[in-house]
Image (cartoon, rainbow, N blue to C red):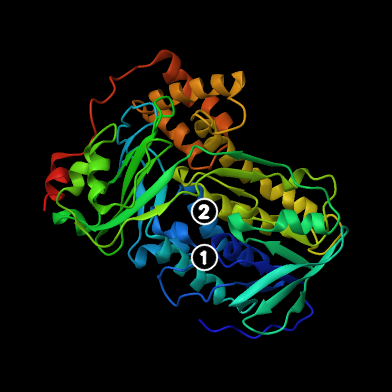
């Protein structure tokens, strides 16, 4: 993927550090207001291939419907393009077999509008790159490393970069966006400019991920096999979980997970036995006739970590932090891509009201984009804080009370379609958590009718037969 020449115009200039999903979405949002230079330390692949800078791409991903909407608003036709290349818009819950953390199986209700985007991360990133980089207002610099910002505590005026073996140079900019991920050096850069150290919080469930790709057995390769998900229960540590994600090419991407004392390993001979040992053995049973297509990939960097940049007393004009550089989440909840897309959409909307380089604009942007960050953070930490050793202090009384309410909401949603709709509105990040206190949830929670919970996974006989090799 060749670099494009640096544009010259009288428009404002923005530099985005990092060409992962968050950086690409930010570039798409900024292109309406500025000429954008996208700085990436890797050499990007031409198609849906793995890349060094996105190790989490080896594991199962999905994009909640709130993220799909944001992506399509930023890049019209994106989800349709993913589907045309082998991805899928799955109906949630109709196309999903899922066991909740409180050990209740969800019914496969048809009566929700939610469609989650299902594909490999390599395919999704490739399609996003194609959409963003075809914009002539976006310039790509590959094999280029950011060394640090130019400017002072009042304003960032650019960024120092080095391409390959060339000498360091400065890219002047009206706005520099750090989207370099969990390894971001933004906290050190800001203190180097004379600003306060940003407050951070970490909640680490100790989760380890292990993923292996399989050829889907039998007729399950035809493309309409449901997602199968067994979630971990924080009340019964160690938490163990697994998901079968049908992706393009007639493959199953299978991710297993376990917290401290119950972690999966890279041993291929232990993969299926681990799946059979989950709270329900359905995933292991499905894998018995599936052919593995590679080795087991393991990741341990799954902690929730948030940096509260929006709360700093002083903030420099011309600087913004987005994506995992601002907050990274336990990937088991699948909210990182949704937050990245929603944050970029808020960025674009804010810049339709605010001049990009004006005093105070960068601070307003940092605060605006913190809204979806906070929503995803609360959803993740509300579960993970209950694992032993996850945080420096135990959950508060308020957090415990909220967790009990959420358990009741899940139990209600598992057997009532109206309540399920409300639950999915929140989980998909389409609506705020207050949606759980709406009549759609509270009436069936308090008054019923209450169907009995399912005794086992709601796979149909036809689906089980399709998965037989």
Decide: few, some or many residues near mark 2? Use Cα within 10 Å; few <14, some 14-19, many ≥20: many
Q: Which of 462 and 257 lies nearest the eye of the viewer?
A: 257
Mark 1 to mark 2 CA distance (whole Å): 15 Å
146 with respect to 46 (left or right): right
Give the class, few, some or many, for how many residues have Cα within 10 Å of label 1's Cα (few <14, many ≥20). Answer: some
Q: Do the residues labelled 1 and 2 touch (CB within 8 Å)?
A: no
User: Based on the displayed image, in which of its 4 quarters is residue 373 positioned?
Assistant: top right
Q: Residue 337 carries which label?
A: 2
Is 84 or 374 nearer to us in this picture?
374
Residue 118's tag is none
Q: Position of residue 29 (x, y in %)?
A: 64, 63
Residue for point 54% across, 84% down: 2
Residue 352 can be seen in this image: no
Measured as percent of width and height from the top left, residue 200 is found at 68, 42
- In screen coordinates, is 227 left or right of 44? left
Q: Quadrant of residue 243?
A: top left
Dot 1: what SS? loop
Q: Earlier in the sequence, mark 1 or mark 2?
A: 1
Q: What element carries label 2?
A: helix
Q: In this view, does 156 lie above or below 108?
A: below
Residue at the image point whose x is 56% and y is 32% from the top? 433
Name the foreground residue: 139 vs 83. Answer: 139
Whole-percent x, y for residue 180 in the image? 62, 61
Q: Is residue 117 left or right of residue 181?
A: left
Q: Give the mark toward the camera: 1 or 2.
A: 1
Q: Where is residue 112 in the image (x, y as percent from the top left)?
A: 39, 39
Q: Is residue 280 visible?
A: yes
Circle 1 residue: 53
- Label total for image: 2
């Amino acid at each position: 993927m060749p670099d494009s020449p640096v544009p010259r115009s009288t428009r404002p200039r923005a530099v985005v550090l990092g060409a992962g999903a968050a950086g690409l979405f930010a570039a798409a949002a900024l292109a309406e207001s500025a000429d954008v230079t996208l700085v990436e330390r890797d050499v990007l692949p031409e198609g849906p291939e793995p890349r060094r800078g996105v190790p989490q791409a080896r594991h199962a991903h999905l994009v909640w419907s709130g993220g799909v909407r944001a992506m399509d608003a930023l890049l019209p036709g994106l989800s349709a393009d993913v589907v045309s290349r082998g991805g899928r818009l799955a109906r949630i819950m109709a196309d999903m077999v899922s066991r909740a953390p409180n050990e209740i199986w969800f019914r496969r209700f048809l009566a929700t509008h939610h469609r989650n985007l299902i594909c490999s991360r390599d395919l999704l990133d490739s399609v996003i790159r194609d959409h963003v980089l075809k914009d002539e207002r976006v310039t790509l610099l590959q094999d280029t490393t950011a060394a640090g910002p130019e400017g002072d505590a009042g304003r960032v005026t650019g960024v120092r970069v080095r391409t390959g073996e060339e000498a360091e140079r400065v890219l002047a900019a009206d706005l520099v966006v750090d989207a370099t991920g969990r390894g971001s050096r933004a906290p050190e850069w800001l203190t180097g400019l004379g600003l306060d150290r940003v407050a951070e919080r970490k909640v680490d469930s100790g989760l380890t991920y292990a993923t292996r790709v399989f050829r889907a057995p039998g007729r399950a390769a035809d493309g309409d096999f449901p997602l199968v998900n067994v979630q971990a229960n924080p009340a019964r540590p160690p938490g163990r979980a697994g998901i079968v994600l049908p992706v393009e090419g007639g493959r199953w991407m299978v991710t297993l997970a376990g917290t401290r004392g119950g972690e999966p390993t890279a041993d291929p001979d232990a993969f299926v036995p681990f799946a059979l040992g989950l709270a329900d053995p359905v995933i292991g049973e499905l894998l018995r006739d599936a052919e593995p297509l590679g080795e087991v990939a393991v990741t341990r960097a799954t902690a929730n970590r948030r940096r509260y940049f929006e709360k700093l007393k002083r903030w420099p004009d011309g600087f913004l932090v987005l994506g995992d550089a601002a907050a990274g989440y336990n990937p088991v909840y699948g909210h990182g891509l949704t937050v990245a897309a929603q944050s970029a959409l808020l960025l674009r909307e804010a810049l339709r009201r605010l001049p990009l380089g004006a005093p105070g604009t960068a601070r307003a942007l940092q605060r605006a984009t913190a809204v979806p960050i906070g929503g995803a953070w609360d959803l993740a930490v509300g579960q993970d804080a209950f694992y032993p050793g996850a945080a420096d202090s135990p959950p508060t009384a308020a957090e415990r009370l909220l967790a009990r309410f959420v358990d009741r909401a899940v139990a209600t949603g598992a057997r009532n379609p109206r309540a399920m709709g409300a639950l999915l509105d929140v989980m998909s990040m389409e609506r705020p958590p207050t949606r759980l206190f709406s009549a759609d949830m509270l009436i069936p929670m308090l008054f019923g009718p209450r169907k009995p919970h399912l005794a086992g996974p709601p796979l149909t006989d036809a689906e089980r037969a399709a998965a037989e090799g």
